[in-house]
Amino acid sequence: MSKRPSFLSPPSYVKHKASGQAVVYQNGRTTYLGKFGSAASKEAYKRLIAEWTVSGGLQDSRQEITNAEVMAAYVAFAKGYYRKAGKVTREYGLIVEACRAIKPLYGRALAVEFGPLALKAVRQSLVDSGLSRKYINKQVDRIKRMTKWAAAEELIPASIPQALSMVTGLRKGRTEARETAPVKPVADSTVDATLDSLPAVVADMIRFQRFTGCRPDEVCSLRPCDLDRSGDVWRYRPESHKTEHHGRDRVVFIGPQAQGVLLRYLARDHQTYCFRPCDSEAKRRAAANKARKTPVSCGNTRGSNVKRHPKRIVGMRYSTDSYRRAIHRACDKAGVGRWSPNRLRHSAATEVRRRFGLEGAQVVLGHASADITQVYAERDATLGTRIAREIG
């Protein structure tokens, strides 16, 4: 069995027999705290443990700490920090991916030796792997953010993030990194062709997003309890949304056409998600049973050939990834080019901006800044209601 790393276990308060002092042993270092059992020594020990806790147990080995240890501490911090509605966000996964890029080249190297050349070497490895320029720049920024955090925790000298800040991002046309095509609106004909090959639930999700211009995650997380149906235009306030950490209140305005799509999904518990994979699977099985040609008295009875322990379990909520994959499968089946649900927002933005101007698009898509005043918020609500009434 491998030895447990010392930074994972808090140092113990022990007595040094020769001197009678309280002492702490950690990472090959000896720290004397004063007379064993005294109030001063216990206070010093509490202070040491407090510093050990906030630094992830690494503050006593600053000169010997490796990049792998810094990354482990930062990932542990990120798992608790980047959360919404009790779940880790996508940012946490991207941080883990950034750390994986460092590990093969500099995982065992000392953190104090990770400089601009090392960062450029990691960046080049991402370029060689075929990743896009924008994604690489964002991952490099995450690595810089990690070193700033480590410096703030006194795990590494402040000179390291200062030096890494000198590394500029890759510029378009001046690097071998792949460029991504801009996200464009998806044509209505393409969407209509895809709808015929989609499950009914996912097709309604697309229709709802098409009418409201909401984000893919917002349509996936829609629940009856999040709706205000007191007016002719409904208002949907997601429990969690992209800009909530800026203090911005997100409202999705639901007009008559979107209401028509949503009505059949509201007769359920108010805390239950409206669009659920389990409902889609139940409809698929019911359709397959209705199309059955073998007499009921022959062959398998309904539900008898279901796997007891399936590898994939049908969930109670679509994720943005499963939503996108369902659309991609339908695109392949329909013989049209693949498109992602976020392109529906671009289509909605294009139409709204053409008919109501730039401000109307900002209102409907929720792109206003976090420091907007209450006067602007009321104007946003009025404009959003008028737009939804006419086109939603």
Image (spheres, helix red, strand yellow):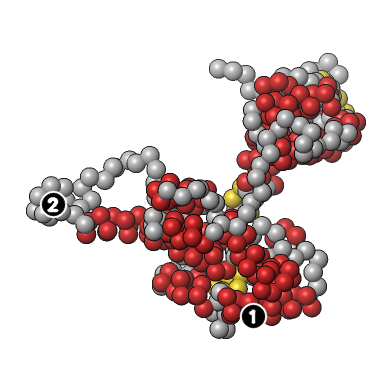
Q: Is residue 133 visible?
A: yes
| Coordinates of residue 223 in the picture (x, y in percent) | 51, 66
Q: Label 1 sits on what residue type?
A: Arg
Q: Callout 1: 10 Å neighbours few (<14), some, many (20+)?
A: some
The answer to whether residue 315 is above or below residue 256 is above
| Coordinates of residue 69 in the picture (x, y in percent) | 72, 27
The answer to whether residue 263 is above or below residue 239 is below
Kindly state the secondary structure of the residue where label 1 is placed. helix
Q: Label 2 sits on what residue type?
A: Thr
Q: Which of the two residues, 174 or 361, is positioned nearer the viewer here?
A: 174
- Kindly identify the residue that appears in the image at 53 percent across and 51 percent down: 339
- Kindly identify the residue that appears in the image at 55 percent across and 17 percent down: 1
Q: Which of the two residues, 362 or 7, is positioned nearer the viewer here?
A: 362
Q: Callout 2: 10 Å neighbours few (<14), some, many (20+)?
A: few
The answer to whether residue 392 is above or below residue 30 is below
| Coordinates of residue 92 in the picture (x, y in percent) | 65, 42
Task: Name the residue beneath numbered marker 1.
Answer: 386
On residue 243, the disc is none
Task: Name the residue beneath numbered marker 2.
Answer: 294
